[in-house]
Image (spheres, helix red, strand yellow):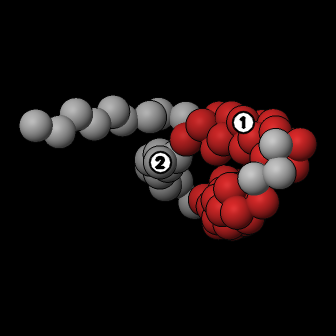
Amino acid sequence: MQITFRQFKEKYVRLLILGNLTSWIIYDFFAKAYLAGISDLFVISSTITAIYRYDIKKEVKENEQDKRMQSILKYYDAHEINLKFYYKKV
């Protein structure tokens, strides 16, 4: 039997993982558990990659799409063309 959970705000989970693993690296250093610290560094680098890929890059893409949509709407408003436009942010 497998139980899974769906997270609606993965960004917060990733930030929580970063904070948690940072404290584990400090513990590993003082406990002289260097291999555990190295594995924590791999997980941290993976988490940072995910933050960039799924959070930062996504926000930049959404901002570009919003700017593009605003320029399209300004164009049609300037030319007085009546359009019914339904723009849904996903």
Query: Which residue ends up furthest to the front in the rendered image?
Result: 32
Residue 81 horizontal/vertical position (percent): 57, 60
Q: Quadrant of residue 24?
A: top right
Mark 1 element type: helix
Of marks 2 and 1, the one in the foreground:
1
Residue 46 horizontal/vertical position (percent): 64, 64
Q: Quadrant of residue 58?
A: bottom right
Residue 10 horizontal/vertical position (percent): 55, 41
Vertical relation: 61 (above or below) 37: below
Instruction: Judge the density around disc 2: few (<14), some (14-19), many (≥20) Cα neighbours within 10 Å.
Output: few
Can you tell which mark lies on residue 90? 2
Mark 2 element type: loop
Left or right, 37 with respect to 72, comes to: right
- The residue labelled by disc 1 is 20
- How many angstroms separate mark 2 from mark 1 (CA)? 30 Å
The answer to whether residue 27 of the structure is visible from this angle is yes
Residue 73 horizontal/vertical position (percent): 66, 57
Vertical relation: 47 (above or below) 21: below
Residue pictured at 22% horizontal, 34% vertical:
3
Residue pictured at 36% horizontal, 35% vertical:
6
The answer to whether residue 62 of the structure is visible from this angle is no
Residue pictured at 17% horizontal, 39% vertical:
2
Residue pictured at 89% horizontal, 42% vertical:
30
Can you tell which mark lies on residue 69? none
Q: Nearer the viewer, residue 19 or 67?
A: 19
Left or right, 15 with respect to 89, comes to: right
Query: Which residue ends up furthest to the left in the rendered image?
Result: 1
Looking at numbered disc 1 in the image, what kind of residue is underneath it?
Asn
Which quadrant is the N terminus positioned in?
Answer: top left
Q: Earlier in the sequence, mark 2 or mark 1?
A: 1
Left or right, 6 with respect to 11, comes to: left
Q: Nearer the viewer, residue 19 or 35?
A: 35
